[in-house]
Amino acid sequence: MPKGLLFASFDFSPAQADEFHDWYDLEHIPERLRVPGFLNAERWIGEENPKVAVATYDLENHAVMQSAPYKAIGYENASVWTKRVTAIATRLLRFAGEQVKPGDAVAPSGAGGLLAVSMNVDPAAEHKFNEWYNSEHLPQLGAVPGVLSARRFSSPEADAERKYLALYHMTGPDVSRSDAWKKAANTPWTERMRPHLRAAAVQLPALRSAIAPGWWCKPGGRPRVKPDNSADRRRCAAGIGKIPIREWR
């Protein structure tokens, strides 16, 4: 069975940044990582707009989203804090789906950039679209120097905002601006397919947030569950003093 994915992105400009990050880091993600079938979690902030936040969760399979443990904390059972923050922040995209290609890969470690591409496609061209994406587009972008992982997903949900999502983990955001990337992304086959894309959107988060899920900040060499000032947050975002949480829990 293919791996699943939960993806969420917000523009949290209307919210207080400290509260938004505290909610995500101290409640929202820990809740989800306790749900059986949630394999990992990552948080990212936008390269150009640091008020854009992205979270990704690899799942054992898409069915985890309908499991009793997840329903106990999600949907109408979301916490008071979740309902408060999400009512203030602007949701850009929520996507839940299953991995199309390669099928069973999870997010790699050590990435410094993440490119997310979501889209719908003209139903009349969907077969050709999938053939292009699977046989040329994803493999070629995945082979660009600096790309650590290239995965694509499809949502089986009837009310999905976008049916397809691709995630590219990179050593840094500059990879997607390289000549090699541009060459791989702009082929004759790609040009033929672009007119069939609907509601395509690109997000390029570049830096992990103050506390990347799976990581806690350790400024000054002392394990700490929460950076307590903006300087500590910047240190964490820059990767200074991070240790895998499993090393000291």
Image: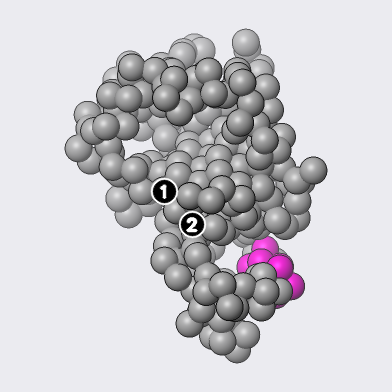
Q: In the image, is 49 to the left or to the right of 236?
A: left
Q: Quadrant of the C terminus?
A: top right
Q: Secondary structure at mark 1?
A: strand
Q: Position of residue 29 (x, y in %)?
A: 49, 25
Residue 220 appears in the rendering: no
| For the residues bearing labels 1 and 2, Cβ distance under 8 angstroms | yes
Q: Secondary structure at mark 2?
A: loop
Specify the principal SS of the magenta part.
Answer: helix
In the displayed structure, 5 sits above or below 87; it is below
Please tell me which residue is depicted at 67% across the width and 35% down the height of the picture.
Answer: 63
Q: In the image, is 219 to the left or to the right of 84?
A: right
* Closer to the eye: label 1 or 2: 2
Residue occupied by mark 1: 93
Q: Position of residue 213 (x, y in %)?
A: 53, 28
Q: Position of residue 81 (x, y in %)?
A: 33, 19
> Of residues 136 and 157, which is closer to you in this image?
157
> Of residues 234 and 68, which is closer to you in this image?
68
Residue located farthest toward the front when viewing the structure as drawn: 158
In the displayed structure, 185 sits above or below 26; it is below
Q: Specify the label residue 162 is tagged with.
A: 2
CA gap between label 1 and label 2 equals 8 Å
Residue 21 appears in the rendering: yes
Please tell me which residue is depicted at 58% across the width and 78% down the height of the picture.
Answer: 124
In the displayed structure, 224 sits above or below 174; it is above
- The numbered mark, 1 or 2, whose residue comes first in the sequence reads 1
Please tell me which residue is depicted at 63% across the width and 54% down the height of the picture.
Answer: 153
What amino acid is found at the position of numbered circle 1 in the picture? Leu
- Range drawn in magenta: 134-142
What amino acid is found at the position of numbered circle 2 in the picture? Arg
**Crowd band around label 2 with a 10 angstrom C-alpha radius: few (<14), some (14–19), many (20+):** many
